[in-house]
C-alpha cells in the first residue's frame, strides 16, 4: 500500500486519536523506512521503546524460537521465562528482596503500582497518592488522574479520588501535600512527557528521607526512563536512591508489549492470590522478548554506550544552542533521553527534521525530545547533529525573515 491508501483506510477505520504524517513500514537498527521508500534516522525509538534498535537479530531469534515453542499460557500455570526475567530485573534494580508482577503496558504497570500502594495502606487508613505537576503516568482512569496535566483529564470525570499534586523538584511542596491518609509519593526520575526535566539530586534524596520519616512509600515511574535509557539501568539509580517499588514498560520489550511492577521487600508480598491479575501478563513470548533485551543491554554494554553517546549528543547540541542562543535556551536530560529546549515552539523544528530524514519529538510545546536507541553509533550521532544544525540554521533564517522586529521572534542578531 502507498501512503495515500494507508491514510484513506486509517481515516475510515480508526478512531482519530493520533494525527500521523508518515507511514513506517520497515526498520533496522536506528533506521526506519516509510511507505514511499524514504529512510529516516530514528531518534524517537517508538518513544523510548526500541532501546536496542529495530529488529535486533538477538531479539528476532528469541521471539522466533519462542513462537515455535509456546506463545501463551495462563498465569494459572508456571512458565519458566517469567521467573528468569523477574530474577534479572530484581538483580539490576538492587532492591533487596525484589519481586515482579508482569503486565502489558506502562499504564497497566502504574495502575498496579497504585493498587499495590493502596492495599499496603488499607489497614493503616492510608490511600492517597501524591504525584507531581507535569508528570505523565498513563491513560487509564487512575493513571490519568495521577498524571499532573489537566489536558489528559478533561471530559473524563468523575475521576477516582485520592490523588493530590505537588511541584516537581520542590520538596517543601511534597511535604505540604502529605496528610495522615497519604500512602505514597509517585515520581519520575526524569519527566519525559513533561518536557525532559530530570529530578534534582537533593529532591530525590530528600523524598526518600521524607517518605521514611512519614512512614509512606516512595514509588518511581520508570516506564520511560527505565531499561538503560538514562545511562543507568533505572532512572532512580542516577540518584543513589531506592524506591519501595517501580513500574516498567516501553523499553522492557523493545516493542513487544510488556510491563512490570518491581517491588522491594516492603511490598513484594502484599499482593496475594486474588488481589491482582491479567490474562496476557508475562507470557512466555513476552518474557522471551524482554529477556533478549536484558541480555543485549548487558552483553553489548549498552549502558556504557548510552553514557558515551549521550555525552557526545549533549556536546553537539550545546554547540547548536550556543549558535542560536537568541531562541534556544539550552540542553537538558540524562543519558540518551535529551531535550533541546527552545524559546519558541518545537513543532516546526521537528517537522523540518522529518523532511530532512530524521525523526524527533516535539514535547511540552517548546522541547525537541531526542531518544535514539541505546546502541546508536558515533556516526549516527554526527549525522543527527548535522541535520539538527542545518534545520536550526534554516529555521533561524525563516524566523528572522518573518519578523519585522527580530527581537520579537528571539532571533535578533
Ligand atoms: C513515564 C510514563 N509513564 C507511563 C506511561 C504510559 O505508558 P503506556 O503508554 O505504555 O500505557 C508513559 C507513556 O508515555 C510514560 O512516559
Image: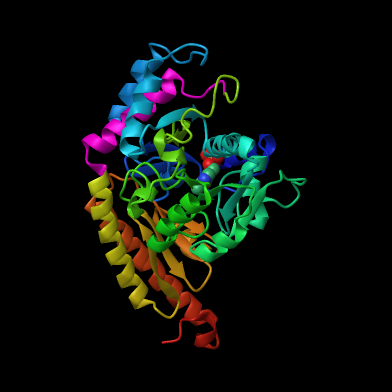
In the rendering, at what x and y percent does residue 245 appear?
Answer: 46, 40
Q: Is residue 43 above or below residue 339?
A: above
The chosen color scheme is rainbow
Please give left or right for residue 110 compared with residue 284 in the image.
right
Tell me which segment is drawn in magenta.
278-302
Query: Which residue is drawn at the image coordinates 55% and 87% (left, top)?
Result: 404
- Residue 279 against residue 120 in the figure, above or below: above
Q: Is residue 303 visible?
A: yes
What secondary structure predominates along the stretch shown in magenta? helix
For the residue pair 78 and 350, the one nearer the viewer reads as 78
At x 60%, y 25%, the residue is 275
Q: Return the residue nearer the eye: 12 or 165.
A: 165
Picture coordinates of residue 400 (x, y %)? 48, 81
User: How many callouts does the rendering have?
Assistant: 0
Q: Name which quarter of the figure residue 250 lies in.
A: top left
Q: Residue at image x 58%, y 37%?
A: 111
| x 54%, y 50%: residue | 185
Amino acid at each position: 500500500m502507498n501512503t495515500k491508501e494507508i491514510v484513506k483506510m486509517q481515516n475510515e477505520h480508526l478512531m482519530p486519536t493520533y494525527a500521523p504524517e508518515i507511514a513506517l513500514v520497515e526498520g533496522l537498527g536506528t533506521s526506519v523506512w516509510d511507505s514511499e521508500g524514504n529512510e529516516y534516522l530514528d531518534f524517537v525509538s517508538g518513544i523510548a521503546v526500541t532501546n536496542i534498535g529495530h529488529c535486533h537479530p538477538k531479539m528476532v531469534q528469541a521471539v522466533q524460537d519462542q513462537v515455535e515453542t509456546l506463545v501463551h499460557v495462563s498465569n494459572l500455570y508456571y512458565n519458566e521465562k517469567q521467573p528468569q526475567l523477574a530474577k534479572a530485573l530484581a538483580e539490576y534494580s538492587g532492591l533487596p528482596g525484589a519481586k515482579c508482577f508482569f503486565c502489558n503496558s506502562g499504564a497497566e504497570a502504574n495502575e498496579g503500582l497504585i493498587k499495590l500502594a493502596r492495599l499496603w495502606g488499607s489497614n493503616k487508613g492510608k490511600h492517597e497518592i501524591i504525584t507531581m505537576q507535569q508528570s505523565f503516568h498513563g491513560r487509564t482512569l487512575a493513571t490519568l488522574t495521577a498524571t499532573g496535566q489537566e489536558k489528559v483529564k478533561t471530559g473524563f470525570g468523575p475521576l477516582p479520588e485520592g490523588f493530590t499534586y505537588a511541584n516537581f523538584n520542590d520538596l517543601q511542596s511534597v511535604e505540604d501535600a502529605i496528610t495522615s491518609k497519604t500512602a505514597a509519593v509517585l515520581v519520575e526520575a526524569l519527566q519525559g512527557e513533561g518536557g525532559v526535566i530530570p529530578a534534582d539530586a537533593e529532591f530525590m534524596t530528600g523524598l526518600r528521607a521524607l517518605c521514611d520519616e512519614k512512614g509512606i512509600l516512595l514509588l518511581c515511574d520508570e516506564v520511560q526512563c527505565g531499561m538503560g535509557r538514562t545511562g543507568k539501568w533505572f532512572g532512580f539509580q542516577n540518584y543513589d536512591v531506592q524506591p519501595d517499588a517501580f513500574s516498567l514498560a516501553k523499553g522492557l520489550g523493545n516493542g513487544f508489549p510488556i510491563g512490570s511492577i518491581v517491588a522491594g521487600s516492603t511490598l513484594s508480598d502484599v499482593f496475594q492470590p486474588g488481589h491482582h491479575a491479567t490474562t496476557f501478563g508475562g507470557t512466555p513470548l513476552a518474557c522471551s522478548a524482554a529477556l533478549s533485551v536484558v541480555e543485549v543491554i548487558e552483553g553489548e554494554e549498552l549502558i556504557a554506550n548510552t553514557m558515551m553517546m549521550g555525552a557526545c549528543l549533549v556536546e553537539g547540541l550545546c554547540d547548536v544552542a550556543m549558535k542560536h542562543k537568541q531562541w534556544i535556551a539550552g540542553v537538558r536530560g540524562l543519558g540518551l533521553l535529551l531535550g533541546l529546549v527552545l524559546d519558541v515552539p518545537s513543532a516546526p523544528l521537528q517537522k523540518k527534521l522529518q523532511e530532512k530524514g530524521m525523526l524527533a519529538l516535539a514535547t511540552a510545546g517548546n522541547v525537541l525530545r531526542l531518544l535514539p536507541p541505546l546502541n546508536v553509533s558515533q556516526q549516527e550521532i554526527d549525522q543527527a547533529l548535522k541535520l539538527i544544525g542545518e534545520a536550526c540554521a534554516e529555521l533561524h533564517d525563516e524566523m528572522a525573515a518573518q519578523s519585522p522586529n527580530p527581537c520579537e521572534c528571539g532571533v535578533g542578531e
